[in-house]
Image (cartoon, grey):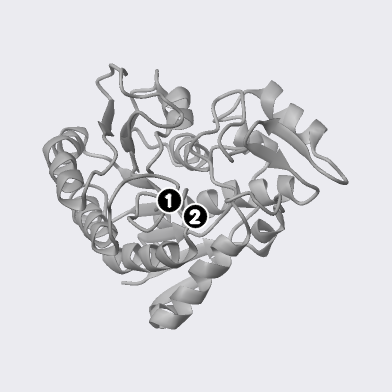
Amino acid sequence: MSVTVFSHPQCMQHQVTEVHPEEPARLSAINDQIIRSGLELAIQQRDGVKASQEQLFHAHSVDYVKDVFARAPSEDHIWLDPDTLMTPGSLDAALYAAGCGISAVDEVMHGENPRAFCVVRPPGHHACYDKAMGFCIFNNIAVAATHALSVHNLERVAIIDFDVHHGNGTEDIFFNDERVLLCSSFQHPFYPDTGADTISPHIINSPMPAGTTGETWREEVCARWWPALERFEPQLILVSAGFDGHAEDDMGNFKLREEDYFWIAKELKTYAERYCSGRVVGMLEGGYDHSSLGRSVVAFIKGLI
């Protein structure tokens, strides 16, 4: 069985300053590596839809969404927070990034293909219920999860987040929603300095120190995430796939490698086949060293295959 890769050309039109690490070339690096690896022959590639305001309202406050639309610039740029800017192409890019997650959920729920991955930007997992944060305008994985819950009437959705930064926005949105299991690993102490003290039966946070190796990270995942997944019995697994924990990525200080991302994708596929007819949707989050990002995404997709 193949994997469907969703993206959209508009995701390249979120232009940033010359020194901003979340740049359009991230997607080019992934696409180039997909071709170079030969993976292009083993996947299906599709354009995602554009998310509507109504679909965003499931994950964000009405006031926040309308404010983003109202403030979207027609020239130059604005800053939504100290790290998150909008240029004339940013709103559509963010809508297609969130919409690709909706398209992917629809595809796996309709049985067309049980596994999908979204190559999109801007990322999403720092965007909270009512504010932008950390390069993120809308929370793409939360929009996908709420679409699955509200449109496909699911009762249990698991979100796995292995970005080097804590998925604070996702935690904020689902903190009081026990229909969602969130498992998140992240460097601590580190931006955004959240998650280490969270107490919740359906949020499994794994703060880990700088220098964490793949072996240590796998031990933590096996000890805490897999038992939680087994208890939860998800009907869909979503993945906030951040690759900035790679040893070559200087955005963080983890020491993960491509084989670690291949491993977790393969393990998630096994759990998905056991509990939810193989349904897994991955969503690109971080990853800023272009070479390791491209290689890691290819390794993750191969693990799903």
- Residue 274's place in the image compared with 38, above or below, is above
Foreground pick, 90 / 273:
90
Which residue is at 88% across, 46% downward? Answer: 75
**Disc 2 element:** loop
**Disc 1 element:** loop
Marking on residue 250: 1
Q: Amino acid at mark 1?
A: Asp
**Does residue 99 appear left or right of residue 192 in this picture?**
right
Which residue is at 40% across, 83% downward? Answer: 38
Q: Amino acid at mark 2?
A: Tyr
**Residue 119's x, y, as percent?**
51, 59
**Residue 146's x, y, as percent?**
48, 35
Foreground pick, 17 / 37:
17
Q: How many residues crowd around disc 2 within 10 Å: few (fewer than 14), some, or many (20 or more)?
A: many
Q: Is residue 66 visible?
A: yes
**Residue 30's x, y, as percent?**
49, 67
Q: Is residue 47 visible?
A: no
- Residue 68's place in the image compared with 262, above or below, is above
Quadrant the N terminus occupies: bottom left
Mark 2 lies on residue: 288
* Labels 2 and 1 touching (C-beta < 8 A): yes
**Residue 84's x, y, as percent?**
64, 37
Quadrant the C terminus occupies: bottom left
Q: How many residues crowd around disc 1 within 10 Å: few (fewer than 14), some, or many (20 or more)?
A: few
- Residue 81's place in the image compared with 244, above or below, is above
